[in-house]
Image: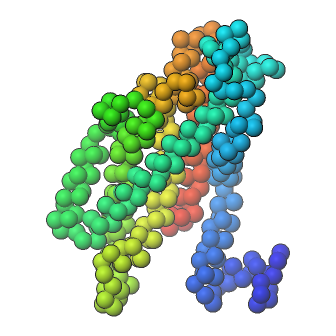
Amino acid sequence: MSANPNGGSLAGWLTADTPRSRAQARLGRLYRGWQGFTRNGLAMLGLAIVLGLVLMAALAPWLAPYDPYQQDLGRRLIPPGAAHWLGTDAFGRDILSRILHGSRLTLYIVALVTVTAPIAGLAIGTVSGYFGGWVDAALMRITDIALAFPKLILALAFVSALGPGIESAIIAIAITSWPAYARIARAETLTIRHSDFIQAARLQGASSARIILGHVVPLCSSSLIVRVTLDMAGIILTAAGLGFLGLGAQPPLPEWGAMIAAGRQYVLDQWWVATMPGIAIFIVSLGFNLLGDGLRDVLDPKSR
């Protein structure tokens, strides 16, 4: 174990009962959280699956044995074997190559939804909870209206209005995802807005924007991180559902939901065409759920 500049082991410095600086305290919290996370075997499995998805997406051009878009009707519907590990589809395209490249689309959708819906929900929830009164009533009524509709049905309505396409699917999923984050952020804000340190910051002349950004938002972030991680599986399933219905990514893009839709007519005889992308969706969704459960155990004080 490497030593720190002041002597002693790095682990001892990180776990010191009396940190000497704010940086040491923050690093110590991260280290203890990582220690707790590594003791959860299922959480580590989820992390391994998610990291595997990221590596698969990053290295897809080099890992894919064939061009995912190249058609070869002479090799259509070949079962899994040495030449094509996961078989080929109705156009003779290698399914493994399409799944590898499809992981890029999956991460693209998850990443864009993650940087839009939670941020919007966090902004609305913290403002609503901090100011209260008519601001809270107005923002929460809008949130309640959005929550009243099933997410997939509302996403279908938005995609139908915007037109089929992966961009429309991302916008629709983001629009239907923010209300849950707003509710969480509001609940967290209501518990801390009258705290002593908030009152102290207000007495020192800090503006409402500075208090929200500097104090309220950081305290709400851990709950939102857990919720975002758990929601990633739902985002993937919603995107796959839109692709299955022909409203998401359009052919010939190797989106997993669209691949299942293309193979449904062969599900009885050429089962691999629809089954392989379905297994990919299942594994990735399971990975995000396990990772989210592990992060909840580490970040949520109520579960400690």
Q: Is residue 157 visible?
A: no
Quarter of the image with the C terminus is bottom right
54 horizontally vs 192: left or right: right
On the image, the x and y values in percent for residue 63 come to 75, 36
Quarter of the image with the N terminus is bottom right
Rendered view: 304 above or below 48:
below
For the residue pair 32 and 62, the one nearer the viewer reads as: 62
For the residue pair 220 and 304, the one nearer the viewer reads as: 220
On the image, the x and y values in percent for residue 76 come to 67, 11
Rendered view: 178 above or below 39:
above
Q: How is the image coloured?
A: rainbow
Say which quarter of the image contains residue 108.
top right
Instruction: Please tell me which residue is depicted at 66% across the width and 71% down the height of the picture.
Output: 31
Instruction: Please tell me which residue is depicted at 23% across the width and 46% down the height of the picture.
Output: 145
Rendered view: 285 above or below 36:
above
Q: Is residue 231 visible?
A: yes
41 horizontally vs 202: left or right: right
Instruction: Please tell me which residue is depicted at 54% across the width and 64% down the height of the picture.
Output: 299
Say which quarter of the image contains residue 36.
bottom right
On the image, the x and y values in percent for residue 115 come to 46, 54
Say which quarter of the image contains residue 101.
top right
